[in-house]
Amino acid sequence: MGAFLVYDVTNLESFKAIDKWYQQILKNTDNRVVCMLIGNKKDKARREVSYKMAAEYAKRNNFGLMEVSAKSGSGVKDAFGRLIQEIYRQIEDENDPDRPLLEPTSD
C-alpha cells in the first residue's frame, strides 16, 4: 500500500501538518505503507518550504520525496511511477525466500 503526503511549497503550515496526516495513516493502516512526501506548486517562485527542509524531513521518516506542479502536470506522472516502484519493491522483499523472517538486531 502507498500514500502521498502532499504539502504546498508556498505554505509552511501545510508542511507542518504532514505529521498529523502521517499519524492518521499509521492509525488506519499497517506499518508497511510506502509514503512519499510530495511538494506541490514547484512552479511558484515564492517558497516557504525549501527543498532541503523537505529532504531532511523525508530522510528522517524514510519517505521518498518529489516536487510537482499539479497546475502544469510537471512531475505528477513520475511521482506515481516512483510510488508504484517502491510498493512493488516492498512486495518483492516480503516474498524473498532468502530474506530473514526477523531482521538482525544490534546488541
Image (cartoon, helix red, strand yellow):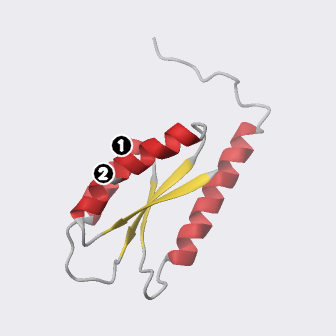
Q: Residue at x 61, y 68 (%)?
A: 81
**Residue 49: in sight, yes or no?**
no
Residue 91 higher or lower than 45, as above or below: above
For label 1, the SS is helix
Q: Residue 69, image x and y in percent?
A: 41, 80
Question: Mark 1 = which residue?
Answer: 60
Residue type beneath disc 1? Arg
**In this view, which residue lies farthest toward the top?**
107
Q: Are marks 1 and 2 in contact (CB under 8 Å)?
A: yes
| Quadrant hosting residue 44 | bottom left
Seen from the viewer's position, the closer of residues 63 and 70 is 70
Residue 102 higher or lower than 51, as above or below: above
Badge 2: how crowded within 10 Å, few (<14), some, or many (20+)? Answer: few
Q: Is residue 75 left or right of residue 41?
A: right
**In this view, which residue lies farthest toward the bottom?**
72
Q: Residue 105, image x and y in percent?
A: 52, 17
Question: Mark 2 = which residue?
Answer: 56
| Quadrant hosting residue 5 | bottom left
Q: Is residue 107 left or right of residue 104?
A: left
Q: Residue 65, image x and y in percent?
A: 43, 60
Q: Is residue 104 left or right of residue 14?
A: right
Residue 96 higher or lower than 76, as above or below: above
Q: Residue at x 52, y 76 (%)?
A: 76
